[in-house]
Image (cartoon, rainbow, N blue to C red):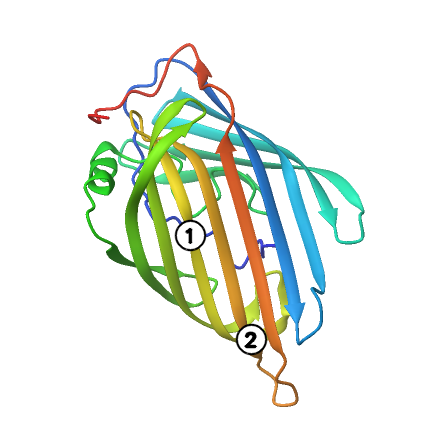
Amino acid sequence: MFAAHAYRGFVALLVPVLLGTATAERHVYYHVSGRDSFAIGTREVRSEITYDGDEMLTIAPVAGGLRYAAKATYDRSEGSGASTRGTATFVAIISPDGRERDERVADPQFLTVLNQPFAVQLDSQTLRDVRNLTAPSPFSFESSMAGTALRGTLRHIPGGLVAGRRVVGIAFDASGPLHGGAPGHPDVVLTGTMRMSGTAYYHRSDALLLELDATLVIAGTLADENASDPVRIVYRRTIRAEKALRGQGAVSSTSSG
C-alpha cells in the first residue's frame, strides 16, 4: 500500500482550483479501484492487494471558500483471498486565492479523488492552457517520497464522454531517481527509479476531475552490499465518475467550454 507518511498522495501537479460561485451543495459519485503489487528477485509476486468500491464527493460553499469532502467505501482483498471492508475520507477547504487547508485526512491507501496527482478541479485558465497544447509540454515537480524532482511531459489527448459529460483529456508521464525506503515497505531500502504515468479527464464546462487512471512504478535493487535482488513495486488507482452530477446548484465556471 501507499506509505501514509512518506508523501501526500501522488503530489498535486495542477494546483489551481476553480472557486466560482457555488449556490448549493453538490454531489459527484465515482467508482474507485486499485492494485498494489510488490515483487523481489526472480520470484513471483510476493504480495498483491486490490481495492474496489464507491465514492461520493460533496462540494459545498463555506465561509472563506469551498469545502470538498470525499468518502470512499471499498473492499480490500489480498492475494490469499481474504477481503475486508474499509472506508477512506478526505476533507479540504479551498480559499478564494487557491490555498488548501486539509480538515481531515484518513485515506492511507490513497483512494479518494482528493488524494491524487491532479487537483480535483482546475481554474478556467489552466483548462484552456491544456486544451490549447499542441505538443508535449515539459514539467517538473518535487516529490517528497523520492527526495528529488520528477521530470516529464504533459500532453493534451482526445476527450470524449465520462458520466455523460464532455471532457478534456490530459496524459502525463514523469520519472526520477529513488534512493531510500520504498513506500509502504520502510524495511526495504532501494536504489532505482520511480515513474508516474496515466491520464486525467476534466469536465469541459466546470473543469471538475471526472476520471483518473494513474500508475506509479518503482524499480530498483536492494541497497545492500550483501544483496542485489531486483525489486519492482506497482501502485495503480482508477477513479471514474459513474453517475450524473447531482445538486440543486453547481460550481460555476468562466471557462468557454
Q: Is residue 247 above or below residue 166?
A: above
Q: Hey, which quadrant is residue 126 in on the image? A: top left
**In the orientation shown, which residue stands out farthest toward the top?**
248
Crowd rating for badge 2 (residues with CA inside 10 Å; few <14, some 14–19, many 20+): many
Residue 9 visible in the current orientation? no
On the image, the x and y values in percent for residue 253 come to 26, 23
The amino acid at mark 1 is: Val
**Residue on which disc 2 sits:** 190
Residue 235 visible in the current orientation? yes
Is 104 positioned to the left or the right of 93 in the image?
right
Is 231 positioned to the left or the right of 125 in the image?
right
**Residue on which disc 1 sits:** 11
Q: Residue at x 75, y 53 (%)?
A: 79
* Residue situated in front as seen by the camera: 125 or 89: 125
Q: Is residue 163 above or below residue 149?
A: above
Quadrant (top left/top right/bottom left/bottom right) for the C terminus:
top left
Q: Secondary structure at mark 2?
A: strand
Q: Residue at x 38, y 23 (%)?
A: 165
Q: Residue at x 38, y 37 (%)?
A: 201
Q: Hey, which quadrant is residue 247 in on the image? A: top left
Q: Hey, which quadrant is residue 196 in on the image? A: bottom left
On the image, the x and y values in percent for residue 41 come to 66, 76
Q: Residue at x 66, y 89 (%)?
A: 226
Q: Are the residues at dot 2 and dot 1 in contact (C-beta closer than 8 Å)?
A: no
